[in-house]
Image: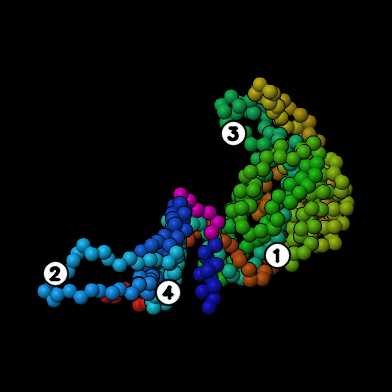
C-alpha cells in the first residue's frame, strides 16, 4: 500500500521540459464531442420508429385479369410523416454506455501520453530519518558591504584587465553557496543509514531585516535565492545588527533541534535599526540560540567604486571603522564564538570550525530531500494501462458483430 501511495506522490509536476507537446490536449474535447454526437455513431445505437407503416391509409385495389400486366403509371399511395421524429433507444443501449466509457478512458490515455511527451519534471522524494542542526545566516547588506578589500592599485589593475573584483558581499555569498552545496552533498548521501541534513535559512538586514529564506533542506531553492540577491535590493544606508539577530531568533524559537545557531556576517558596527544589540542578545539567551559573529574585511580602510550616469566608475579609498568588541560581546553572552576574517578562505575555514562545535540532533521522519527528476515514464505507464483497459472493454462489450 505504501508503494502505491509513493507512486502517486511521484506524479506531482513542477515544470515541463517540452511544454509545446501539451497542445495535443486541445484535441481531447473535440474527440469526445465527435464520438458522442457524430451521426453515424448515433444511428448505430438508436433507431427511428417505423412511422411509415403506422400512418398508411387503407388501400383498395381493383380487380384485373390474372394475365394483365400491372400499370406502372397508376399513382402510388401517398404517406404522411409526423411533424417531428422521436428517437427510441435500441436494444444495444448497454453497448452505447460502454462505448462512452471506453472513449473516456481512451481520451485519458491520450492525455497522459501528451503529458509524458511534454517531459514533466517533478521531485523524487526520499523520506528517511535524519539528523541535523538549525542554522540561520544573518548577512549584512549595508552599503559598506560593496567595498573591495584590495589596495587601490590592485583594484585599478583589475578594472583595466576587466577582471572580476569581488566585494565583501560577493565573498560572503560565495562562501555561503559553497556551504549550502556541501550540506546538500552530505544530505543526499543515500549510502548512509541516517542522513545528516542541516536546515539552513537566511536573514538579510541593512536599515531593516527580513527573512529571505526560512529554515529549509531544499538546498537548490536556497542557492537560487542567494544568487539573486544584490546590495541595492533594500535600503542599504544603515546596518541594523540587532534587528537581524532578533529576526533569526524569532524563526528559531519553535525549533526542536538541540543546536540552534546564528552565523552573523557583517563588516562593521551597529548603525540604526529599531532593536538594540542587548535586546537581541536577551532574546537569543531566552531561546538558547548561539550567535557566531564573523567580521569580514581586512582592515579599517577599503576601496569603493562609484558609477556615474555616464557609466564611468571612480575608485577611491574610504575609512570604515569597525567594532569587533561588540561582536565578541554578542558571542560571549550567547555561547558562541567571534571570528575575524580577511577573505573567503578564512571565512570557509571558520564556518567549518563553527559546525564542529555544534551537536546535531535527531529530527522526525520527514521528507529529507527532494531532487529534480524526470517523471515522464510514470505518465507513459499510466497512458499504457488506460489504453489497454479501453481496448479490452471495447473488445468485450462494444465490438459490433454481424
Residue lying farthest to the left in this orientation: 67
Q: Nearer the viewer, mark 3 or mark 1?
A: 3
Residue 39 falls left or right of residue 266: left
Question: In this orientation, does residue 115 appear?
Answer: no
User: Is residue 17 depicted above or below 97 in this figure?
Assistant: above
Marks 3 and 1, Cα distance to the nearest angstrom? 38 Å
Total marks placed: 4
What residue is shown with label 1?
Answer: 359
The answer to whether the residue labelled 2 contacts the one labelled 4, judged by CB atoms less than 8 Å apart, is no
Marks 3 and 4, Cα distance to the nearest angstrom? 80 Å
What residue is shown with label 3?
Answer: 164
Residue 207 falls left or right of residue 158: right
Q: Nearer the viewer, mark 3 or mark 4?
A: 4
Percent x, y for residue 278?
88, 51
Q: Which of the image's four quarters has the C terminus?
A: bottom left
Identify which residue is drawn at 67% across, 56% down. Answer: 200
Q: Which contiguous range is marked in magenta?
A: 13-20
What residue is shown with label 2?
Answer: 69
The answer to whether the residue labelled 2 contacts the one labelled 1, judged by CB atoms less than 8 Å apart, is no
**N-term mark: 1 or 4:** 4
Amino acid at each position: 500500500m505504501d508503494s502505491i501511495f509513493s507512486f502517486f506522490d511521484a506524479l506531482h509536476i513542477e515544470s515541463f521540459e517540452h511544454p509545446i507537446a501539451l497542445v495535443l490536449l486541445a484535441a481531447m474535447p473535440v474527440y469526445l464531442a465527435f464520438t458522442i454526437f457524430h451521426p453515424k455513431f448515433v444511428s448505430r445505437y438508436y433507431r427511428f420508429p417505423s412511422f411509415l407503416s403506422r400512418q398508411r391509409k387503407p388501400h383498395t385495389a381493383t380487380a384485373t385479369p390474372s394475365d394483365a400486366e400491372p400499370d406502372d403509371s397508376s399513382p402510388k399511395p401517398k404517406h404522411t410523416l409526423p411533424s417531428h421524429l422521436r428517437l427510441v433507444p435500441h436494444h444495444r443501449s448497454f453497448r452505447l454506455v460502454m462505448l462512452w466509457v471506453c472513449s473516456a478512458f481512451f481520451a485519458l490515455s491520450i492525455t497522459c501520453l501528451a503529458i509524458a511527451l511534454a517531459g514533466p519534471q517533478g521531485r523524487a522524494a526520499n523520506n528517511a530519518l535524519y539528523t541535523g542542526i538549525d542554522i540561520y545566516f544573518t548577512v549584512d547588506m549595508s552599503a559598506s558591504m560593496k567595498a573591495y578589500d584590495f589596495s587601490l592599485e590592485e583594484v585599478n589593475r583589475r578594472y583595466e584587465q576587466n577582471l572580476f573584483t569581488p566585494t565583501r558581499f560577493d565573498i560572503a555569498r560565495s562562501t555561503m553557496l559553497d556551504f549550502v552545496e556541501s550540506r546538500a552533498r552530505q544530505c543526499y548521501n543515500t549510502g548512509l543509514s541516517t542522513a545528516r541534513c542541516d536546515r539552513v535559512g537566511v536573514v538579510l538586514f541593512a536599515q531593516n531585516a527580513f527573512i529571505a529564506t526560512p529554515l529549509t533542506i531544499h538546498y537548490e531553492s536556497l542557492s537560487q535565492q542567494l544568487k539573486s540577491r544584490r546590495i541595492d535590493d533594500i535600503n542599504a544606508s544603515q546596518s541594523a545588527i540587532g534587528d537581524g539577530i532578533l529576526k533569526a531568533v524569532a524563526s528559531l524559537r519553535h525549533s526542536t533541534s538541540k543546536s540552534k545557531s546564528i552565523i552573523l556576517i557583517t563588516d562593521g558596527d551597529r548603525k540604526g535599526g529599531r532593536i538594540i544589540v542587548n535586546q537581541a542578545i536577551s532574546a537569543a539567551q531566552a531561546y538558547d540560540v548561539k550567535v557566531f559573529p564573523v567580521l569580514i574585511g581586512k582592515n579599517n580602510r577599503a576601496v569603493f567604486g562609484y558609477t556615474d550616469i555616464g557609466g564611468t566608475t571612480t575608485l577611491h579609498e574610504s575609512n570604515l571603522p569597525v567594532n569587533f568588541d561588540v561582536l565578541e560581546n554578542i558571542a560571549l553572552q550567547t555561547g558562541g564564538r567571534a571570528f575575524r576574517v580577511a577573505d573567503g578562505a578564512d571565512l570557509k575555514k571558520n564556518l567549518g570550525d563553527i559546525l564542529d562545535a555544534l551537536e546535531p540532533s535527531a529530527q522526525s521522519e520527514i521528507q529529507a530531500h527532494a531532487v529534480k527528476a524526470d517523471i515522464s515514464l510514470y505518465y507513459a505507464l499510466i497512458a499504457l494501462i488506460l489504453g489497454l483497459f479501453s481496448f479490452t472493454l471495447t473488445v468485450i462489450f462494444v465490438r459490433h458483430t454481424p
